[in-house]
Amino acid sequence: RKEVEQDPGPFNVPEGATVAFNCTYSNSASQSFFWYRQDCRKEPKLLMSVYSSGNEDGRFTAQLNRASQYISLLIRDSKLSDSATYLCVVSPNTGGFKTIFGAGTRLFVKA
Amino acid sequence: DAGVIQSPRHEVTEMGQEVTLRCKPISGHNSLFWYRQTMMRGLELLIYFNNNVPIDDSGMPEDRFSAKMPNASFSTLKIQPSEPRDSAVYFCASSPTGMYLRPGNTIYFGEGSWLTVV
């Protein structure tokens, strides 16, 4: 089993749609969680951190389920500009484990 | 503020040639990472430096790859000799908090060096 797993997609959605991505992780020592966004032929950039109680940033909502070891990202009212690859990132709180980037989920938002 | 700066942005080289990629991390960050990204394998950590010292190089593919960080503001990743399977995007990244990321202190990537070995 991979340490961090994401559905690769692609997700093809129309503008205005709501879309959700999940990411599962295997290391229970994981402490911090993030979603990064990567545009085509660009570097990954931080989209948002994921807090235990869940958090929103505009149209984006991130949630964490420690018991089931997954994080999610919900995008409401999708825009064409949301088309990108979304990487989940899991970071441990102890030595011996690495920060792991998921392989990413590709999203295409169509007009 | 300047971000992570990488050079060259693009390089095409012939198999067997030496390739040197360069990176200037964000000032004040004590950790530097070299990642490789391909369609098949995603984003892979090659090596991680903390305070200029290599901490984890378990991701370096083989002896053809080497990395140095002679000071806090400069690092190189060298491939010698290069092979076609080394073709990838190589990202340098830096962080103020080391390998263990926290909200508000995460990892910042350079724009990448796009390497093609023919």
Image (cartoon, coloured by chain):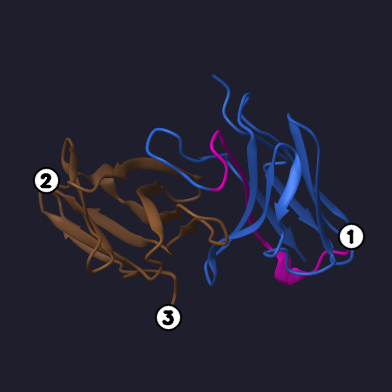
Precedes in sequence: disc 2 or disc 3: 3
Looking at numbered disc 3 in the image, what kind of residue is underneath it?
A: Arg
Mark pair 2, 1: CA separation:
49 Å
Q: Colour of chain A?
A: brown
Mark 1 belongs to chain: B
The quarter holding residue B75 reads top right
Q: Secondary structure at mark 2?
A: loop
Q: Chain of mark 3?
A: A
Distance (Cα) linking label 2 and label 3: 33 Å
Figure check: B71 above or below B12: above
| Residue at which label 1 appears | B17
In front of the other: B90 or A23:
A23
Q: Residues within 10 Å of mark 3 (few under 14, many from 20)?
A: few
Mark 3, secondary structure of its residue: loop
Magenta region, residue range: B81-99
What residue would you read off at disc 3? A1
**Horizontal side of residue A92 vs B53, given as left or right:** left
Report the residue at 54% width, 58% height from top.
Answer: A98
Circle 1 SS class: loop
Give left or right: position of B49 versus A96.
right
